[in-house]
Amino acid sequence: MAALVPDPVAPLATAAGLALAVAGAESNVAMYLADHAVPVRWVSAVGDDPFGARVRAEVAGRGVDVTGVRTDPARPTGLLVKDPAPDGTRVHYYRRGSAASALGPDLLADPALSGAALLHLTGITAALSPSCRALLDAALDGPVPVSFDVNHRRALWRDGSAPAVLRDLADRADVVFVGLDEAQDLWGASLAAAQDVRALLPGPALLVVKDGPRAATAFTGAAPGATPVTCTVPAPRVDVVEPVGAGDAFAAGFLAALHRGEPLPRCLRLAHLTAAAALRVPADHGPLPPAERIAALLAASDDAWSRLTVPEARRAAEPDPEAAATH
């Protein structure tokens, strides 16, 4: 979907201007996966309008295969508008009757999905329409492993069904991402720690619980005969510009490392680093550190990782590009 973002960052009511960007949980994940050199295809629908053309072109420009994106001649491309504020960012959605809201289970027969190793879905899609909910139900019953980000957006669940629906969908998926505060909002404040969320969602073979700027914990071992493993990695300190989109980046970083066969601690580290890239920009998509720096941070000692702040201070041996340009 298209997004309008105050630029520079300010409350919408006083913003000097709005920048046009691309948003949407699944396309965000796809673009960050492409940044990590993971082959990825985005399958969705946009309207036959300038927003749709812009979305398709920008996602493709990030290295994502968009051959599975449909153009709907009768429905518009969805739109969101960000409203940053000191106590958090509100998002106003304009997506009722959008092209993506008309998707349904028939999408799973699209040739664009053939050969997929993993299908990534989110709770946002489940809220868009009955046909989109049916799409998720069918996908979870299908042969392709499913990664599911709970991604609860209160504004999209006006009928109060979110707790039951999202718990059911999450517990049926293979890989699940959920924030601790998100879980508390959905299923009760008694979920005081990541372990409580795991007890509530025993089904996923791999569950990742994010605890805001503090840490993230991954749980494995739901499969019969498997030895349960729990791994917690603290988040680096980040100078946050705007938080919306960081959860999608986190999921992409984790899935990219998982795709490469990295151990869980490195999966969580790459998730944190990718989320930091999104936190540092007003739009949903920000630049990653250079590949060699990412590799060094993934291999760093626990002590060095615990002291990481983003953006990093320039190391003494690193030349100042501005000074070099004046010579």
Image: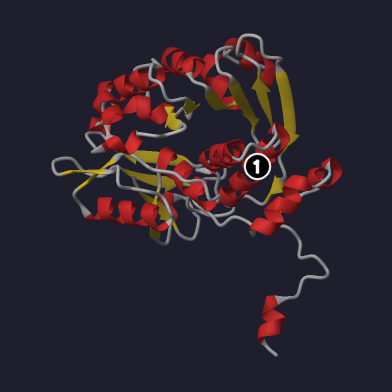
Q: How is the image coloured?
A: secondary structure
In the image, residue 167 sits, relative to residue 325, either above or below, namely above
Residue 184, quarter of picture: top right
In this rendering, does residue 187 appear at all?
yes
Residue 246, quarter of picture: top right
Which quarter shows the N terminus?
top left
In this rendering, does residue 190 appear at all?
no
Q: Describe the element under mark 1 as helix, strand or loop.
A: helix
Horizontally, is 308 left or right of 107 in the view?
A: right
Image spot of residue 10 (x, y percent)? 49, 54
From the viewer's side, name the closer residue of 55 and 20.
Answer: 55
Which quarter shows the C terminus?
bottom right
From the viewer's side, name the closer residue of 294 and 280.
Answer: 294
Horizontally, is 6 left or right of 214 in the view?
A: left
Horizontally, is 114 left or right of 84 in the view?
A: left
Residue reaching furthest to the front? 115
Image spot of residue 279 (x, y percent)? 58, 48
Residue reaching furthest to the right? 303
Kindly identify the residue that appears in the image at 35 percent across and 25 percent down. Answer: 127
Kindly identify the residue that appears in the image at 65 percent across and 42 percent down. Answer: 272
Kindly identify the residue that appears in the image at 72 percent across and 35 percent down. Answer: 265
From the viewer's side, name the closer residue of 181 and 34.
Answer: 34
Q: Label 1 crowding class (10 Å Cα cut-off): few <14, some 14-19, many 20+?
A: many
The residue under label 1 is 272
Kindly identify the residue that appears in the image at 31 percent across and 23 percent down. Answer: 135
Three-letter amino acid code of the residue under disc 1: His
Image spot of residue 201 (x, y percent)? 57, 14
In the image, residue 321 sits, relative to residue 288, either above or below, namely below
Residue reaching furthest to the left? 74
Residue 290, quarter of picture: bottom right
Image spot of residue 321 (x, y percent)? 68, 77
